[in-house]
Image (cartoon, rainbow, N blue to C red):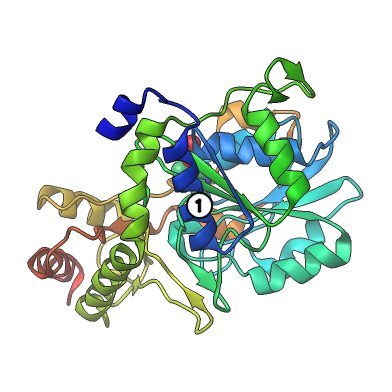
């Protein structure tokens, strides 16, 4: 950060370029474009598709609200497909929601676990749909050895709580020269050359001060992710066999980066999810509920003209069951022991 301050170039300078290169390498993509949040990454990615009003984007109902807000902000219409056991959009059910207005699929890699891109990409290709990955929580996750963000247009968040953070920030990854070019213009008021406007753009730029905060984390990404995975393994060991508690699972071809370690508390458990959350909070354990409701289940979206909803029984059920336990890389084995002992104490027979 001192280097940035002394250079006098505080925005869109070399530190931003270096962070972009680090994302290009990590996601094995041709282009990485830094922006000022994960939300603007999603907005810019959709804007780059040049959709018309009424064009539809299909996404998951079980996500952070930014996914939905970005679709609305970009002037498209959101449609939803219910989730599977992995908390992500059910790839096998997507075809039911495709209409003649569908232009893009926007899977979310929730909690750091890839949505089933092996199911989604062939469908998108067959139907001529663009794919935008909401990879806000999933930097470093892979399916079939391929990093998330390299299947479609990848959108990452660098918000304070994410696996890599610049405080606020975002990144878009793509193999496409055309998409990359449009996003770079959108980021900078629609200009390639100063004061030569080629489209109505915006200011989506990241600062070099922020990029300087992110760079060392990208250098340590493999070890930070490994630490999260180790912590998840210890949680798995300490929490296995508790009745009514469903632990996160991982397919052989997908790697989880455990942005969150999320369990489901089912009706077979001794306490319900809210009681367990309360008990753990009282014992000083920081738990979270991501997310308490299906994303469109709020008054402001209920009659929104750009939000088309269908019943989402699984997402609705899971919203009452999910609980995220601490898994971040700074935890010690003792910390994890404290967590598993508390859960076992509250739920064990
Ligand atoms: C954090 C997040 C976003 C938005 O990122 P911001 O950087 O907070 O704007 C979008 N989608 C998901 C799934 C997220 O978790």
* x then y, percent, for residue 279: 16, 53
Instruction: Name the residue: 50% across, 80% down.
Output: 251
Q: Quadrant of the C terminus?
A: bottom left
* Residue 242: quadrant of the picture: bottom left
Q: Which residue is mark 1?
A: 21
| Nearest the eye: 65 or 282 | 65
Tell me: residue 173, above or below residue 34.
below
Neighbourhood count class around disc 1 (C-alpha, 10 Å): few under 14, some 14–19, many 20 upward = some
* x then y, percent, for residue 301: 63, 31
Instruction: Name the residue: 11% across, 50% down.
Output: 284
Q: Secondary structure at mark 1?
A: helix
Tell me: residue 208, above or below residue 131.
above
Residue 293 seen in the figure: no
With 235 as the anchor, is 138 left or right in this view? right
Instruction: Name the residue: 43% across, 46% down.
Output: 292
* x then y, percent, for residue 51: 82, 37
Q: Quadrant of the N terminus?
A: top left
* Residue 226: quadrant of the picture: bottom left
| Nearest the eye: 161 or 212 | 212
| Nearest the eye: 122 or 1 | 1
Instruction: Name the residue: 37% across, 50% down.
Output: 164
Badge count: 1
* Residue 302: quadrant of the picture: top right
Residue 312 seen in the figure: yes
Tell me: residue 124, above or below residue 301.
below
Q: In the orientation shown, which residue stands out farthest toward the right?
A: 100
With 170 as the anchor, is 272 left or right in this view? left
């Amino acid at each position: 950060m001192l280097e940035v301050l002394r250079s006098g170039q505080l925005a869109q300078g070399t530190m931003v370029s270096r962070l972009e290169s680090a994302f290009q390498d990590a996601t094995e993509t041709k282009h990485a474009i830094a922006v000022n949040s994960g939300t603007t990454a999603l907005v810019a990615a959709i804007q780059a598709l040049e959709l018309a009003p009424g064009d539809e984007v299909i996404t998951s109902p079980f996500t952070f609200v930014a996914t939905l807000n970005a679709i609305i902000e970009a002037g498209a219409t959101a449609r939803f497909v219910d989730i599977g056991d992995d908390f992500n959009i059910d790839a096998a059910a997507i075809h039911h929601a495709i209409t003649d207005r569908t232009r893009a699929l926007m899977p979310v890699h929730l909690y750091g676990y890839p949505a089933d891109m092996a199911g989604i990409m062939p469908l998108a290709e067959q139907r001529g749909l663009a794919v935008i990955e909401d990879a806000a929580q999933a930097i470093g996750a892979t399916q079939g050895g391929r990093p998330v963000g390299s299947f479609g247009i990848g959108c990452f968040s660098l918000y304070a709580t994410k696996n890599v953070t610049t405080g606020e920030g975002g990144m878009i990854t793509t193999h496409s020269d055309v998409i990359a070019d449009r996003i770079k213009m959108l980021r900078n008021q629609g200009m390639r050359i100063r004061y030569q406007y080629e489209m109505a753009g915006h200011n989506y730029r990241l600062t070099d001060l922020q990029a300087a905060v992110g760079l060392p984390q990208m250098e340590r990404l493999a070890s930070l992710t490994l630490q999260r995975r180790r912590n998840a393994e210890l949680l798995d060991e300490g929490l296995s066999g508790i009745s009514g508690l469903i632990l996160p699972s991982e397919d052989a071809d997908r790697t989880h980066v455990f942005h969150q370690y999320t369990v489901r508390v089912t009706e077979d458990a001794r306490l319900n999810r809210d009681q367990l959350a309360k008990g753990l909070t009282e014992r000083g354990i920081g738990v979270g509920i991501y997310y308490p409701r299906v994303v469109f289940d709020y008054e402001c979206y209920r009659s929104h003209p750009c939000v088309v909803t269908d019943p989402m029984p699984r997402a609705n059920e899971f919203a009452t069951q999910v609980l995220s336990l601490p898994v971040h890389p700074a935890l010690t084995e003792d910390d994890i022991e404290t967590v598993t002992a508390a859960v076992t104490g509250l739920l064990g027979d």
